Amino acid sequence: MGWTLFFMIIILKIPMIAALWLVWYAVKEVPEPEEETLTDEDRGPRKKLPPLPRWPRRGPVLGGGDCKPAPCPQQVTKRIERPAPAYARRPERV
């Protein structure tokens, strides 16, 4: 019982002390100030943004762009009968 108590009281505290020291060191460290930050006036003139895309033109389109889609096929009212897959078939009872 003596070594177990020693291990839990002394040895397991070492990582906790190291973590606390690391946090303390990170908090007390002061960030270095950056050298002269440039303001908007020092950067020079801004670049002009490219123009936004235009809306599509209306009216007849040259080159076959106004083709009509193919007509829809008539609706089928009769269902096609297909045999069920082998794993879905019910065994016939005799």
Image (cartoon, helix red, strand yellow):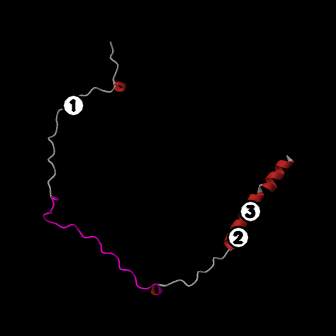
Residue indicated by mark 3: 18
Residue 54 in percent (x, y) is at 25, 70
- In the displayed orientation, state which residue is furthest to the left: 60
Place of residue 4 in the rendered image (x, y in percent of width and height, measured from the top left): 82, 48
| Mark 2: secondary structure | helix
Mark 2 crowd level (few <14, some 14–19, many ≥20, 10 Å Cα):
few
Question: Looking at the picture, does residue 7 appear above or below residue 52?
Answer: above
Q: Could you say whether the residue bearing mark 3 is in a helix, strand or loop?
A: helix
Q: Which mark is residue 25?
A: 2
Percent from the top left, x then y, of residue 27?
67, 71
Which residue, given by chain and number where applicable, does mark 1 sit on? 80
Q: Residue at x 63, y 78 (%)?
A: 32
Furthest-bottom residue in view? 41
Q: Residue 22 colored magenta?
A: no
Q: Which residue is at 30% across, 75% downward?
A: 51
User: Which is more N-terminal, label 3 or label 2?
Assistant: 3
Q: Secondary structure at mark 1?
A: loop
Marks 1 and 2, Cα distance to the nearest angstrom? 78 Å
Count of numbered labels shown in the rendering: 3
Where, by quadrant of the figure, is residue 77 drawn? Answer: top left
